[in-house]
Image: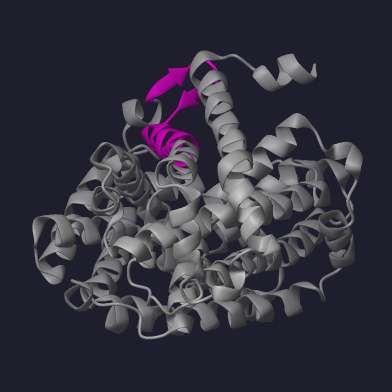
Amino acid sequence: MATQRGGFSSRLGFILAAAGSAVGLGNIWKFPFEVGQGGGAAFVMMYLFFCFVLCFPVMVAEIAIGRKTQLNPVGAFKALGYKNWAIVGYLGLASGVLILSFYNVVAAWAFGYFVEMLLGHFDIGSRFGEFTADWITVGSYSIIFMLGTAYVVSRGVSSGIEKAAKILMPTLFIMIVALIIYALTLPNAMEGIKFYLVPDFSKITGNVVYSALGQAFFSLSLGMGALITYGSYVSKNDNIVSSAASITLMDVGVATLAGLLIFPIVFFQANGDQEVLGGLLKGGEGLIFESLPAVFESLGSTLGVVIGALFFLLLSFAAFTSTISLLEVPTAYVVDQHKISRSKGTWLVAVFIFLVGIPSMLSAGAVDWLSNFITLEGAGDKSFMGFVALIASDTFLPLGGFLIAVFTAYVWKKENFNMEMANGDEEIRGSWLQSYVDIAIGYICPLLLGTIFIITVLDNFMGIKILEMVLG
């Protein structure tokens, strides 16, 4: 079974591929505006804390389940002898399909902006709504992105996913470091660094903690079965604990670097105007797509084209590493469970997900009723894409993580989990790290992830602002 499915040829290949799964738009697009709205360095500290305290143990559990069974998320729970728990795998499968359906659209925006920057169309930022509503243009970029993703996945684990990761991840790091070096030379850059790295603890509120916790979990691609799938391609001799630590460090590293890039640019654009700065920091999802093109234009026609194109190419690369893993999850399912060849299975799944994503594509201004799809009690007006993101990312992922933690600790049992952790790392037996992971997976993770899920449901769907009620 393992030979037919393929596998990673090296531990480094697995780490780069899994880190690529985690590194994506969540790091470079979403993380900076979450930091801006969360008050800067205080949010960053909470985010880092949760990545290592909460997310690392769940990551180890997912990889262990995958390696133990050598199967996709649905097949993994069945292979362990708990068929009823396969629903967790189906939940992860649904999450991955839904997330990729709209993620591919946002990736198309990033790729489209790369093209616009190459052409010197700096006014694209002021035409963001017009651009996203142009479903023919966005659809064309979306098709290109999905074709590239499907091509890589169809090539297999070693020849496709691992090979792509070994090219994409180092290139991504080189691009972001090069852009940071330039950003630090801009006027007011150090003010941006101060906002980003010097914490103001008065900024830590219940909402900041909640947002940091959710961002950490989303950033590391947990709860959707991606790491169970990637773990199923890992050798029994590999040290999965140190691999999980490396993946977490790489993901956190890219997010941290993204902040070092974005905030010097934001403070440069504000040029000391606190009103402008406040608007930029609270700019939300539009921070990158609406605000940055004007910054690149201010650098001059030649330099602006180079820096702007490089930035959105970086964003596209980050998106590509994640779309690959998101497509691999359902592909592994159809290959394992339905015995379809990898090539055929990949293209069938890719076409299906692209079709599922069409309403999200049209909900960015092209079709009015999809753009104003639903009004929720607590979340307000949502487009179809926003509604899918709320369901799949904000709701399903913490629920999936909660169920995986409960399953690992109380159904599969810690003893079996610890035995799988010890394969490739005998020294972990009886160590403080094993004790911590056991405590985290049994108590800390279920408590915090269950809390995130409950708060999300009460807040967004019922309008019950529990954090405000509890904290005043």
Query: The C terminus appears in which quarter of the rendering?
Result: top right
Query: In the picture provided, is 227 more to the left or to the right than 30?
Result: left
Query: In the picture provided, is 455 more to the left or to the right than 394?
Result: right
Residue at 82% over, 38% down:
204
- Closer to the camera, 418 or 191? 418
Q: Which of the 4 image quarters holds residue 242? A: bottom right
Residue 61 shows in the view: yes
**Residue 416 position in % (x across, y down):** 43, 56
Above/below status of 73 relative to 452: below
- Closer to the camera, 247 or 25? 247
**Residue 14 position in % (x across, y down):** 43, 76
Whether the magenta-drawn stretch holds residue 392 is answered as yes
**Residue 274 position in % (x across, y down):** 87, 44
Above/below status of 219 relative to 425: above
Above/below status of 96 relative to 410: below
Query: In the picture provided, is 422 more to the left or to the right than 2?
Result: right
Residue 29 shows in the view: no
Magenta region, residue range:
373-397
**Residue 292 position in % (x across, y down):** 64, 59
Query: The N terminus appears in which quarter of the rendering?
Result: bottom left
